[in-house]
Amino acid sequence: MTPLRTERLLLAPLDAGDRDAFVAYRRDPDVARWQSWTPDFSADDAGRLLEGQPAGFPPPAGEWLQIAVRDAASGALLGDVAVHTSADQPDTYEVGVTVAVEHQRRGIAGEALGAVVAALFDHHKAHRVTATSDQKNTAVARLLTALGFRHEGRAVEADWFKGEWTTLDSWAILARER
Ligand SMILES: CC(C)(COP(=O)(O)OP(=O)(O)OC[C@H]1O[C@@H](n2cnc3c(N)ncnc32)[C@H](O)[C@@H]1OP(=O)(O)O)[C@@H](O)C(=O)NCCC(=O)NCCS
């Protein structure tokens, strides 16, 4: 993957050198609450994930790629953007984003996810990019709305997630909507 640069950030695949910072923010309960992992996410879990990363961007059909979001000046890991290539539909991707709590509310997620979505549409002929969120997650709803995602569905109490029925919002943006 050719690194993506924005005003403040450098985006490139997560690598072994990111492991400790990656584990630190994944173990934060305020981050893990909204994601598929739990606060006991370990260095071994991270090692397996990093070793299994696909090489290219976008990743092969059916696979996820975790892209490191780094401070362009210091190189510090601030979070990551995840991209999944649909195995069922051509030119269709799903995205997710995580920012370490100490770096949240500075527009980092917007800048990083915006750059990845732009790369998918502008350089990889994406037709549709989607995201899914927990209805209670107001931060990600605001983020996706600001990036131009359309709220296209709500599955009410559809997912038994971390001990409760969770309502899922689905979001999408099409190439022709940009
Ligand atoms: C969602 C998340 C990625 C946002 O990261 P961020 O860098 O703080 O986001 P930004 O600073 O770019 O802000 C994006 C929008 O979210 C809003 N926002 C950020 N944190 C918020 C919070 N805790 N509560 C309410 N709104 C919040 C911002 O105000 C902004 O909205 P606006 O443009 O209408 O003002 C971050 O909170 C996070 O990593 N959360 C845990 C993991 C997660 O929920 N990931 C998404 C799963 S799909």
Image: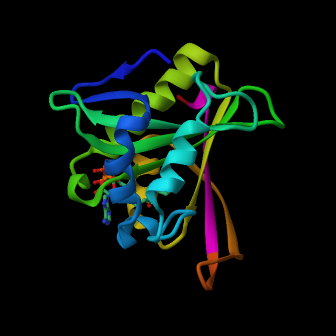
Do we see residue 130 in this rendering? yes
The question of residue 128 being in magenta is answered with no
**Residue depicted at 48% across the width and 73% down the height:** 136
**Taking the image as four quarters, which one is ligand 1 found in?**
bottom left
| Residue stretch in magenta | 167-177
Asked if residue 24 lies left or right of residue 136, the reply is: left
Residue 140 sits in quarter: bottom left
Residue 74 sits in quarter: top left
Do we see residue 65 in this rendering? no
**Position of residue 85 measured from the top left corner of the image (x, y, whole percent):** 69, 34
Q: Residue furthest left?
A: 73
| Front in this rendered view, residue 18 or 103 | 18
**Residue depicted at 75% across the width and 31% down the height:** 61
When the figure is inspected, residue 37 is found, relative to residue 175, above or below; the finding is: below
**Position of residue 13 measured from the top left corner of the image (x, y, whole percent):** 46, 30
**Position of residue 32 measured from the top left corner of the image (x, y, whole percent):** 45, 67
Colour mapping used in the image: rainbow
| Front in this rendered view, residue 124 or 162 | 162
Q: Residue furthest bottom?
A: 163
**Position of residue 110 measured from the top left corner of the image (x, y, whole percent):** 35, 42
| Front in this rendered view, residue 128 or 85 | 85
Asked if residue 52 lies left or right of residue 5, the reply is: right
When the figure is inspected, residue 48 is found, relative to residue 89, above or below; the finding is: below
